[in-house]
Amino acid sequence: MLATEACSDGTDLVVWVPAAEVQQIVTLYARTARLVRAPGADGADPEADAHAFLAWAATTSRSWLVVLNDVTDPDGVGPWWPAGPNGWVLATSRFHDARMTGGNRTRIDVDLYTPDEAVAYLETRLAGEAATHLLEGRAAELAHALGRLPLALAHAAACLINEDLTAGEYLQRLEDSGQLLEQLLPGWADTEQYGRGAAAALLLSLDAAHHTEPAGLAEPVLRIAALLDPAGHPGTLWQTPTLLGHLSEAAGREVAWSESRSALRVLHRYHLLAYDSRTPCQQIRIHALTARATRETTPVTEQPGLVTTAADALLKSWPDPEQHHRELAATLRANTDALHLNGGRHLWNGAAHPLLFRSAISLHHAGLYRTAHDQWHEIIRLAAEFLGPDHPDTHYARTNLANSYSRLGRYADALVLHEQALDHVTRTHGPDHPDNTWRPEQPPTTYRDLGRHQEAADLAEQVLAGYERTLGPDHPDTFRARANLAVSYDNVGRHDEARALGEQAMADGERILGPHHPATSRARDRLAATYLSLGAGTRMPRSTQSRH
């Protein structure tokens, strides 16, 4: 509401930031920095652009408001708290933490409605739908039964309106649901302290929605949504074959996207989630307490399948390459984090779910190297715990940690991990094994970073020969190995050989991956550098020149 008022009052810049994950803050600050043309924001480094936005906010004469919504890590958010003479910051959080009130910040506690406020809310809400008569003068009784919690009252009001229920009928349903709630939501499970009244309102609204056409879809939709980021997930997720198949199995019939969308709209009408098609990448939002109550009333036996289904759908939705879909990738990373938080153990059933790796690799693509470093460390810890220290997925995570070290300039640390991986794969599978948990072309790259160019060239030759034997000349990995060897040859002065390999790699990249693939573009740029090394008399091939 404050953000809406700020826009109406003519505030120059209003930024709404889902603040549960620091990477979301960095991503949105970076995008904002480019929109306001903050000095130093060039799109090359998201963290640098985010700092440029903070510097802009501290010095600009324009008015601004930043809303940090749902802060869960005060320490992590602390460095990203804007300050400036013409700006304001509003942060929402469920944490009563002294760290939130430092730096002259003021905390305003938002608690339950007072009895009068609760009655006023119900009367106003139903008056807007010309349905005040449904309250039967029992608004105060209904508010008391629901603990005066705003969320529970919102669920109840939606149910009264959509079902044309009187307050008396609704209270009777609340009373009848007591035995079920004792089984599904025992007192010890009420960790958010929202009370059984909120859960009762949720169950009644969900039951009504579940029987509304398209019947049988509301509950399975809500149970998936409850595992994801409350700040929002893409509506396109519900168009994936993964989720449509899940809904088809739940309904016992084939479900199309049109029905999936209708189910989302039903849940929106019953105030169980928000469906706003105008918000790109985060069309589907759910209140954190609604999500918590939904998870706590989901049978334990169904949880592993739901978590795996949600993970499969997120992975299916990931853009590749993602360079032109940064906002979508950031949203998918936030949803991956939420899914891991809500059901993480089910993503480690015999192997790590590929979604975990895809999300961490995405941090590299986004330029969030420090965050990627921390995430790979955590994945290694969990992989060792769930799978064991010698599991292939544990080794894969270590290799990616080495890549993070390289991105941070810690080449010696990276090389130690790469050499350990090389020794493990050689002992376990032999030197030419195409093991997908480790990239043999990475140690030569790290040797180059350390200036050990001859060692890099020697190892790069072995890698290319091994790939050609095991994968064949037209495999994408063989193409990358050939391009890397061309760079190594160039570094040791073997420019003619580097040019021949580079031209072959560029042609292979265009044929195998396409002319606009990032790997093909890198091969083209490396070949251009080789031509420069050979002197001004050497010209790029016509097909290459035409793309520059």
Image: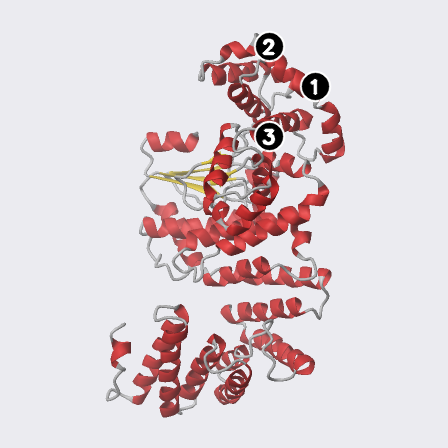
Q: Say which element carries label 2.
A: loop
Where does the image place residue 544, in percent across and percent down from the top left?
Answer: 29, 77
Which of the two marks, 1 or 2, is nearer to us in this view? 1
Give the mark, 1 or 2, whose residue is nearer the N terminus.
2
Where does the image place residue 462, in percent across and percent down from the top left?
Answer: 54, 87
Give the mark, 1 or 3, whose residue is nearer the N terminus.
1
Q: Amino acid under label 2?
A: Arg
Point out the residue furthest to the front here: 253
Per the model, the C-alpha gap separating discs 1 and 2 is 15 Å
Q: Say which element carries label 3.
A: helix
Where does the image place residue 49, in percent across and percent down from the top left?
Answer: 40, 56
Q: Nearer the viewer, residue 27 or 320?
A: 320
Residue where numbered disc 3 is placed: 206
Residue where numbered disc 1 is placed: 175
Give the mark, 2 or 3, whose residue is nearer the N terminus.
2
Dividing the image into 4 quarters, which one contains the N terminus? top left
Residue where numbered disc 2 is placed: 138
Q: Is residue 456 above or below residue 258?
A: below
Residues marked 1 and 2 touching at CB (< 8 Å): no
Q: Is residue 131 visible?
A: yes
Residues marked 2 and 3 touching at CB (< 8 Å): no
Which of the two marks, 2 or 3, is nearer to us in this view? 3
Q: Amino acid under label 1?
A: Glu
Q: Is residue 125 above or below residue 542?
A: above
**Residue at x-position 69% and y-position 57%:** 349
